[in-house]
Amino acid sequence: METIILGWYILVETDSVLWLTLFGSLQFLGTLLAPMFGVMSDRLGRRAMLCGMRAIYALLACMIVTLSVAGLLNPIYVFIVAFVSGLIRPSDLVMRNALIGDTIPTAQLSNAMGVSRTTLDSARVAGALTGAGLFSQLGMTYAYVAVVAVYAISFLLTFGVSKVRLTALSETKTSPFRDLVRGLQYAYSVPLLQALLWLAFLVNLTAYPAIMGLMPYIAREIYHLDENGLSHLVAALAIGALLGSIFMILAGRAGATGKAMVLGIVCWFVLLLIFAHVETKAWGIALLVLIGFVQSIGMIAMSVTLLVTAEPSMRGRIMGVRMLAVYGLPIGLFAISGIIDAIGFIGTISLYAVVGLMATGLTVFKWRREILS
């Protein structure tokens, strides 16, 4: 909901794809801090970290509402809020995935990750449709009041999270920085973790930017839609992801394999290549559903494999290191605006898809024994 509202606001106010992609990039700056968030979650516990993060989200949303009510809101303030939020938001997934690894038996991890994704994806569907509707009917201020309310409810519900903490503070002899270094060394020492982290970087560099950051641009410039049309596109992607999550729940352990991950990623790039040449909303929505489906399968399989491979005491750190791969997303987003100006939308998305396919093929070939075993 929040991303749709602010993304559309930035595009309308600036009329620039460069500023839109910059806004998207700012939301992922915190990937550099994610490993340290993982270290602190291993020490302080997942619940304490999640509560603090959600309190900050609510505070930032209150700032947007206050500025909007006062008539002072402009793109600069939105960029500032996106910057601060971006330092924290990427680590949210670290906490949730590590918490699942702490509390769910290994045999049930695939099902648990699928259930977790269904809640996330269904929320995205509802958020996309609700956010756009509120924005178009009631305006920025009232739409953002709803965002504040959701964050406040989320903060209160987080108190029900398990208090699992793997390392007692009184037993901790090393500094957080040393723990972080140990996590990086551990990730480098396990070939399968190397392969998974590299694949995660590739999809964030070439697959996610082609859809996520450009969705408002695609809605307005390619399909000539308003904010409600944008919500339909975002909802279609989320519906596909929801179906993929349900598929992984039904597949159980059989779905959480390296082969499923590779197949999902390869299909993702192929569908992006087709999506680049579609110029109608109906076909675009159909392809977005398929993209969301294979994306969900690939990413759930990757997350489960990471959690199963990593030692329990290292899960927070490894999931934090995994989030470093998300830094490929702002890099890909920042580059994509200039490439669109040079070779157009079709050429840019096709280029990203082909490069992603080739890099994925090379990665799977190099670590084929670890990934496909």
Image: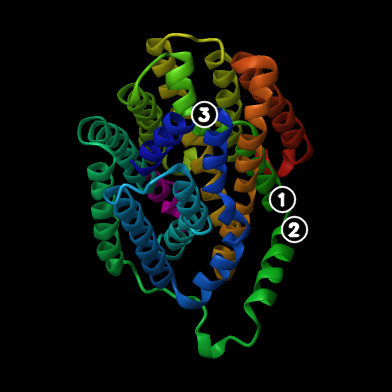
Disc nearer the start of the sequence (3/2): 2
Query: Which numbered dot is residue 188?
Result: 2
Which of the two labelled residues, at mark 1 and mark 3, occupies the earlier sequence position? 1
Is 220 included in the stretch rendered in magenta? no
Q: Residue furthest bottom?
A: 170
What segment carries the magenta color? 106-114
Q: Quadrant of residue 311?
A: bottom right
Q: Quadrant of the C terminus?
A: top right
Relative placement, left or right, of 306 versus 104 is right
Question: Mark 1–mark 2 contact, CB under 8 Å?
Answer: yes
| CA–CA distance in space, label 3 to label 2 | 33 Å
What residue sits 49% from the left and 27% below the top? 15
Dot 3: within a 10 Å radius of its alpha carbon, few (fewer than 14), some, or many (20 or more) residues?
A: many
The front one of 42 and 229 is 229
Quadrant for residue 243, please give it.
top left
Position of residue 119 in the picture relative to residue 19 (left or right): left
Give, as a three-letter code, the residue at label 1: Gln
Label 2 crowd bin: few (<14), some (14–19), many (20+), radius 10 Å: some
Please identify the quadrant where the N terminus is shown.
top left
- The numbered mark at residue 279 is none
Residue at 52% across, 80% down: 167
Image coordinates for residue 315, horizontal then vertical, percent: 55, 63
Q: Which residue is mark 3?
A: 214
Q: Is residue 269 above or below residue 297?
A: above
Q: Which residue occupies 77% across, 32% down?
A: 362
The residue that label 1 is drawn on is 194
Q: Amino acid at mark 2?
A: Tyr
| Mark-to-mark CA distance, 1 and 3 | 29 Å
Q: Position of residue 278 (x, y in %)?
A: 50, 10
Q: Position of residue 101 (x, y in %)?
A: 47, 60
Amino acid type, residue under disc 3 in the picture: Leu
Q: Nearer the viewer, residue 207 or 209?
A: 209
